[in-house]
Image (spheres, coloured by chain):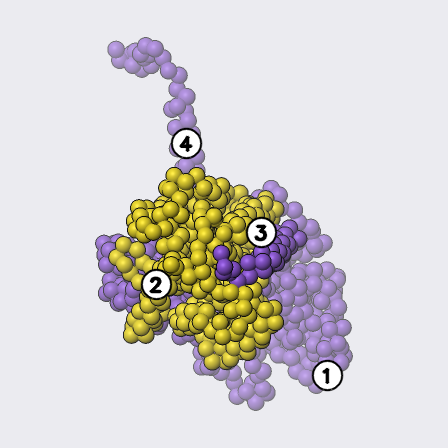
Amino acid sequence: MSLFLEKNSYYKDFELSFKERLINMSWSFFALICLVIFIGLTLLYSITGGIDSWTQRQLIHFAVGCVVFFAIALSNLRFWMKYAYVIYALTLGMLVVVYVRGALHMGAQRWIDLKIVQIQPSELMKIALVLALARYFHSSSDEDVKRNTHLIIPLILMGLPVSLILLQPDLGTALMLVFVTVAIFWLIGVQWWKFGIGALIGIVSAFVGWQYFLHDYQKDRVLTFLNPERDPLGVGYHIMQSKITLGSGGVFGKGFMQGTQSHLNFIPEKHTDFIFTVLAEEFGLVGAGFLLLLYMIIIFYGIRMSLKSCNFFGKILGLGLTVNFALYVFINISMVMGVMPVVGIPLPLVSYGGTAMLVLMAGFGLIENVHINEEMVIGRLGVDEE
Amino acid sequence: MSWEAAGVKEIKKRAYILAMAMFFFSLFLFFRMFFLQVIDAEKYQTLAERNRIGLRQIAPARGLIFDRNGLPLAQNRKTFRAILTAENTEGSVSAVLEKFKKLVPLEEEEVERILKDVKKRRSFVPVRVKEDLTFEQMASLQLNMPELPGISIEESLMRVYPEKETSAHVIGYVSFLTEDDLKKNESLQNLPDARIGRTGIESFFEQELAGVPGTRRMEINAVGREVRELERQEAIAGEDLYLSLDARLQKIGFDAMKDESGSAILMDVRTGEILMLVSTPSFDPNIFNYPIDSKTWKSLNGNDRRPMVNKSISEHYSPGSTFKIVVALAGLDAGTIKPSTKIDCEGRLFVGDHPFHCWRRKGHGALNLIEALQHSCDIYFYEVARKVGVDKIVETADRLGFGKKTGIESQNEKSGLLPSKAWKSAQFGDGWRLGDTMNLGIGQGFLNSTPMQMVQMMAWVANGGYAVKPTLLKQDPDKVNSESLGFSRHYLLEILEGLKAVVNKSGGTAYHTRFDVNGQYMGGKTASTQIRRISLAEREKGLKQQHELAWKDRDHAFFVGYAPVNKPRYAIAVAVEHGGGGGMVAAPIASSIMRQVLELEIADKEAERQRIQESVSKLSLKNKPKTLYPVFTDEEKEEN
């Protein structure tokens, strides 16, 4: 911690002590997160029929996630403001590396292997982009926001990673970045009508994208989403089986470890993207509804904590990350219920997966950090002011 | 602070709107969940169950077939087959098959079939590689198992007919299900190993023999692999059948008939049990266990002598002179003739301008009934037929079972044809003529009967006029009840006397086939029926000898008989297609069979007597009183 705390002695007076930070911390927020993770571990236990490597590894992900959470939550918010662009640039650099390597090796490649952990830069970008945008809008005035030219840089900040991610191709993550950016634009007060124009541009570009950029399998997914019976044995099979799994759970579910659809492998990706169906099958509407409720509490908690922050950077950062989390929840649940095409977004904190867990915990750490430092005042020019 | 960040007032409002939107979206998701999990739950639960449960059938063991003495006629033999599970082959199916071929011969066609099957099925579904492995093949496969990944050995049941061709027609055979069978009976779908009876007893008693398949309710996963058994209902084995046949007699009959194309039936006249039923030429029913090649199939079905047809039941012929028994009975029954009535045979007889010939050109002179039967005089029976009339003959023949199925346990029985006035006018729109009656009088013309009908008629005459139903199932002799046909016993005895004379009196048409087994004799009636009309010109030129004709043009030869003459127990019918003369061909076969039957009966009785004696002596030994101290017999006492 001291690494972040003691460096810049000039701001020392304004800093909270480590003890104060611990006192300010919202433990109930952390408890809610743990509860959701516990549900996820329970489901993995059920799927694999015991504590086997899946559950064990997810437990490790959780432990590492907690370390990341506390490290970030208790760090200095100014540090993140100061290095927001640097983090963004580094992440973008990694995306480029991934893209170039993928192009050289002929094929999709989303990972950077750091020997100890594999990092998915597109996941990291979900935080980095919010950081960069929060940093940018922190110093914007009301007038700035209303000016179109002021929005060019944020659009570029979004556009670069989105293009690289679309090239991977990972439609789900790209969409999430676009939505987060739109939400932040909305929050800082961009005029209503500009969203109308944006939507129009979106529709046109979607049309162009459909014609020239979407891969066949992605088109298939969209078409099948629009009409699952189109291909009941091919792509539609997953959506059908997913709905069967959900529906057959009924109100109270088939019971812990009693899910037939999941245990007999009728659901694809049951450990990851479709894990919500396992919950719905074994614990019914009650279980699924309970998880949805937990998610909503976390989201509203996040919004409330962010809004209380005295600095604009914190507000935007907290809200942006909360929206990011909400997007995970909504996209994943919509996807498995056949409300949205299958775009490969995991169920946050529940689906198996290391990068997603670390990125989410880092995001929550930042939200917690904003909460801890809610009374901190940061000048217009940020850390380098005066 | 001079600077105020953008949207500080605005951001709260905007955040609330965003929060509201998210709240409503989550409500929407919840309603969607509610819709799927509550309103449509039942639908999805059904779908999930259908995903999960698969029914697998367990093949029942087919019922066994035994002869009357408990000798097996159809058995199930445990065999071993090699199967291949593609997912275990560690890569190349064909490489494994190459290695397999070095140990067990495998034809190129088979290899192709296997590769095709492997492609068609999921990789964990086993494919048959080689059926009915010999012991040596099994051993060499077992030894080399480590080099044959994916190959395993599986037990299966094969149908075995130990009597082979001797009983092929009557027992029938089974073979694998075809597409048609599956279409007809979808419940058989899941029994790839099941076989179905095609002919004979196997087919007629299919229901009883087949048993009831068991079921296994399996939990299956997404790719169709069986995960576990939820419920199991064992198969019920088929019923065992005890036939009236005697496997030893089958062999005797088959050996006697081997060189001919025809059939021979032996019936117990008291119980109706068919003791022997052979049809020749025959085939080995064991070959149908596995699909047979087209060459074999052609040789069986494109053969002039029709080895696949059961000629005793599924073939009918003009009964010829054997029908004279019926005509004689009709005459006696109607009172038209008396046994002593004499009719003069001059070799031919005119009806209008049309001459009817006796088979003996120079005539037989004056004959009574017994003599007429003995010599098979045609003129006598022409006269009787003319006097008694068609209606009476038809009525008598009908009572004796002509023109209708005997009801023997077979699916391919022919009913023969008993022509009548009504039948002829319906068939040809033509009136019945006197000539038709004359032809009927000697069993020619439209009349057709199966050898089974002939032996039935013989049995009913021999047993004193009781309509015992011929059957292939073993009967309890005490429980046979049969109606009387209403013929006078006296008349029947007169006819039997005539039949006795045929074989045992000098000049009888089968005199040369007589025998004497412990004072037991056979009686019977020969018949040769032309299958070709003899033209007047030919008759003038002098008839060709039968052996000079092509096989196809030769007469059919028949013999019906009974034994022993003093107390009939057996009736026999022998039909030889294109055999030539009944007396020359059919009678010797019948005589040889009957003689062996009677000899076997005596041997059986002797064996039985000895067995009883042995068991009685054992019994008396066992019951010897045990004493605590040595007891001396009187003799021993004296010696001491």
| Residue receiving disc 3 | A248
| Residue receiving disc 2 | A86
Looking at the picture, do discs 4 and 2 lie on one chain?
Answer: no
Q: CA distance from mark 2 to mark 3?
A: 49 Å
- Give the quarter of the figure containing the C terminus of chain B: top left
Looking at the picture, do discs 3 and 1 lie on one chain?
Answer: no
Tag 4 near tag 1, CB within 8 Å? no
Q: Can you give x and y, in whole percent of width and height, for residue B87 in the image?
A: 35, 60
Residue B615 numbered mark, or none: 4
Residue sitting at the far bottom: B537
Q: CA distance from mark 4 to mark 2?
A: 111 Å
The mark that comes first in sequence, 4 or 1, is 1
Mark in the foreground, 3 or 1: 3
Chain identifier of the residue bearing label 1 in the image = B
Quarter location, residue A106: bottom left
B554 left or right of B100 in image: right
Chain identifier of the residue bearing label 3 in the image = A
Chain identifier of the residue bearing label 4 in the image = B
Label 3 neighbour load within 10 Å: few <14, some 14-19, many 20+: many
Q: Colour of chain B?
A: purple
Observer-nearest of B539 and B286: B286
Q: Can you give x and y, in whole percent of width and height, for residue B417 in the image?
A: 65, 70
Q: CA distance from mark 3 to mark 4?
A: 72 Å
Tag 3 near tag 4, CB within 8 Å? no
Mark in the foreground, 4 or 2: 2
Q: Can you give x and y, in whole percent of width and height, for residue A206 in the image?
A: 52, 75
- Chain with colour yellow in the figure: A
Q: CA distance from mark 2 to mark 1?
A: 132 Å
